[in-house]
Amino acid sequence: MSFRGRMSYGDYLSLDTILDAQHPLSHAHDELLFIVQHQTSELWLKLALHEMEAACTAIATDRLDVAFKMLTRVARIFEQLNGAWDVLRTMTPSEYSEFRDALGQSSGFQSYQYRAVEFVAGNRNTAMLTPHAHRPDLDARLRAILARPSLYDEAIRLLARRGFAVEAERADLSQPRADSDALVAAWARVYADPAGQWDLYQLAEKLVDFEDYFRRWRFNHVTTVERIIGSKRGTGGTSGVAYLRRMLDVVLFPELWRVRTQM
Ligand code: HEM
């Protein structure tokens, strides 16, 4: 039972570092909940990014089965992040008010990893680089993601390799893609004959599944936020709930949603 000189559970997991990383700035009982909820979300986002970036490479190298496994895991990560809101919802406005001032201007709006998830998926909104300009290391990592094809770009490149008439190359990968009727037509052919190209059909559904869970995360977030702060401005400086409601309209894979109208 002695671990003197041997690696223990806590050594392997760097538990001293992780469990010593909660530093409430007030005496409010609920601030620890708030910190743990954010930190665990960031850990899961780290894993989601790891899987999403590997899925991009797997699609680019035509290893679709590998990508499917990773994308399934990403959807499950968001499913479980969605469940986590139920813990945070136990905090009332009175309890949050006890420590809100201590947060200053810090906000999830400045979550580098959340932005990275959006950028990797395909939502290339370069205005969201600004909150990271003061951190050249994070800014460089986000710009490196923007310089590479997104998950959706890789799916479109795959369609082109399979002979579909879609515009796969983009002059500037960091900019948003233009909506494409040709892409809707390509997905329509995939959905019209699932057995004919089962892997493309499965890829389409994996992407929709990811976006579905991601949307639920956004919805849970805005509902939790409204429940806790009503329509007060956010600590990050946006209009708060009104801003988050606008974000519900952001679509990651537009043609995969548009094609459903045609079926
Ligand atoms: C009491 C709980 C929470 C409140 C009151 C809250 C409030 C807000 C508000 C008002 C915004 C808009 C930006 C701003 O002006 O600050 C925001 C953005 C954001 N929050 Fe939260 N939040 C909470 C919990 C969380 C948690 C647990 C996470 C998990 C990481 C999170 C992640 C984010 C992210 C990623 C954004 C940016 C969303 C976007 O730009 O689309 N928030 N939050």
Image (cartoon, rainbow, N blue to C red):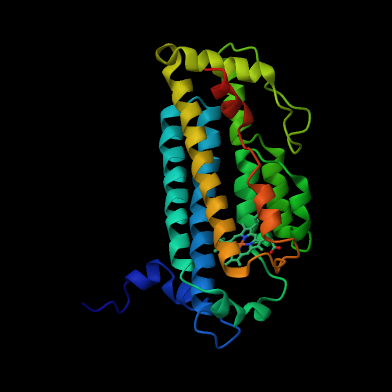
Residue occupying the far left of the picture: 1
> Which of the four quarters of the rendered structure image does ligand 1 lie in?
bottom right
Using the image, determine if residue 144 lies above or below residue 257. Answer: below
Residue 81 placed where, x, y %? 46, 55
Residue depicted at x 59% and y 57%: 222
- Asked whether 161 or 73 is in front, the reply is 73
As drawn, is 251 to the left or to the right of 59?
A: right
Number of dots carrying numbers: 0
Q: Is residue 7 visible?
A: no
Residue 133 placed where, x, y %? 78, 59
Residue 73 placed where, x, y %? 42, 44
Using the image, determine if residue 163 lies above or below residue 243. Answer: above
- Which quadrant: the N terminus? bottom left
Q: Is residue 260 visible?
A: yes
User: Would you identify the image quadrant in which residue 130 lies?
Assistant: bottom right
- Asked whether 229 or 167 is in front, the reply is 229
User: Would you identify the image quadrant in which residue 60 lies?
Assistant: top right
Residue depicted at x 55% and y 35%: 56
- Asked whether 229 or 152 is in front, the reply is 229
Using the image, determine if residue 206 lies above or below residue 93. Answer: above
Using the image, determine if residue 109 lies above or below residue 152. Answer: below
- Asked whether 64 or 90 is in front, the reply is 90
Residue depicted at x 61% and y 55%: 113
Residue 254 placed where, x, y %? 63, 31
As drawn, is 145 to the left or to the right of 192?
A: right
